[in-house]
Image (tube, rainbow, N blue to C red):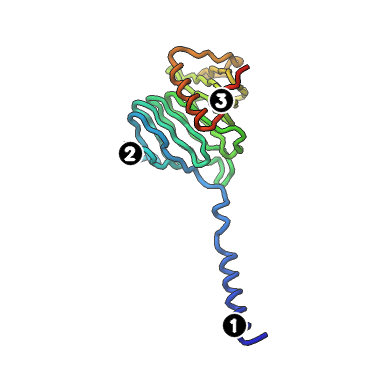
Amino acid sequence: MSPRERRVLPIALVAATILAGWPWGAAAQPQGLSAKIATLAGRAELSRKQGPWATAALRDEVSEGDAVRTIAGRLTVRTDSGQSVRLGARTQIVFAAAAAPGASAPTRLRMDGGLMWVAVAPNSPPSTHIEVRAGPTTITVPDGGTSIGMNPDGSVTVNVYHGAAQVSGDGWQRTLAQDQALLVPPVGAPKETAALKRDKHDAEWAKWNEQQDTAGGYGVRIEK
């Protein structure tokens, strides 16, 4: 080995050691929630980590522990995985941390009232699904479009317009498919799933969201 080669070898070893210890793999590890306000029509507010409410703006970033609420109009929060949560007027949600730090789990949020639509693209991996805690029930949307409404009496209405949803509570679980609905009472298990009825009061809400789903690649209702 020449003198020059003897000088180069230690330098190469040091460089290799530094590179081996560098956190290149960090980008591949499960990350915390990263989302943005993608559409905003009306008035909305954002609270960061239980802080004071402030006026929300288009493209505001949303992270774990942040809350979003609409005063009037509609708002869409889109996760970095491409899934969408759309809020109707007078709706409030809070994004929760993963069940275990670093775990590959669905995006979790709590709904504190109002009307919400969850849109998840078909064939999405489980780590990108949306899990919503609404009153006495938890709704997990693996694909398609599902509307969730919290009623004044404490009950929760879950309507699956296309795709599917899993709805669970204390000691019970239901799986809903396209055109199925479930009314979850404030206490106890719900009755069996029912056929989805497109009531006049939410017809415009459903039509707008279905149009958004079609345009955004979240799937469409399959005619039977």
Secondary structure type for disc 2: loop
What residue lies at 47% left-to-right and 25% top-to-bottom?
209
Q: Quadrant of residue 26?
A: bottom right
Disc sitting over residue 7 in the figure: 1
Badge 2 vs badge 1, beta-carbon distance below 8 Å: no
Left or right of residue 168, residue 117 in this image: left
What is the C-alpha distance between the residues marked 2 and 3? 39 Å
Q: Is residue 174 above or below residue 105?
A: above
Q: In this view, which residue lies farthest toward the front?
A: 215
Task: Say which label, 2 or 3, has the lower sequence index.
Answer: 2
Residue type marked 3? Val
Disc sitting over residue 150 in the figure: none
What residue lies at 34% left-to-right and 38% top-to-bottom?
57
Residue type marked 2? Pro
Badge 3 vs badge 1, beta-carbon distance below 8 Å: no
What is the C-alpha distance between the residues marked 3 and 1? 65 Å
Q: Which residue is mark 3?
A: 220
Crowding near the residue tagged with mark 2, few <14, some 14–19, many ≥20 C-alpha atoms within 10 Å: few
Quadrant where the C terminus sits is top right
* Frontmost residue, 32 versus 39: 39
Q: Which residue is mark 2?
A: 52
What residue lies at 59% left-to-right and 69% top-to-bottom?
17
> x, y (%) of residue 46?
36, 37
> x, y (%) of residue 162?
57, 23
Task: Say which label, 3 or 1, has the lower sequence index.
Answer: 1
Secondary structure type for disc 1: helix
Residue type marked 1? Arg
Q: Is residue 29 visible?
A: yes
* Frontmost residue, 24 versus 205: 205
> x, y (%) of residue 153?
45, 17
What is the C-alpha distance between the residues marked 2 and 1? 60 Å
* Frontmost residue, 3 versus 116: 3
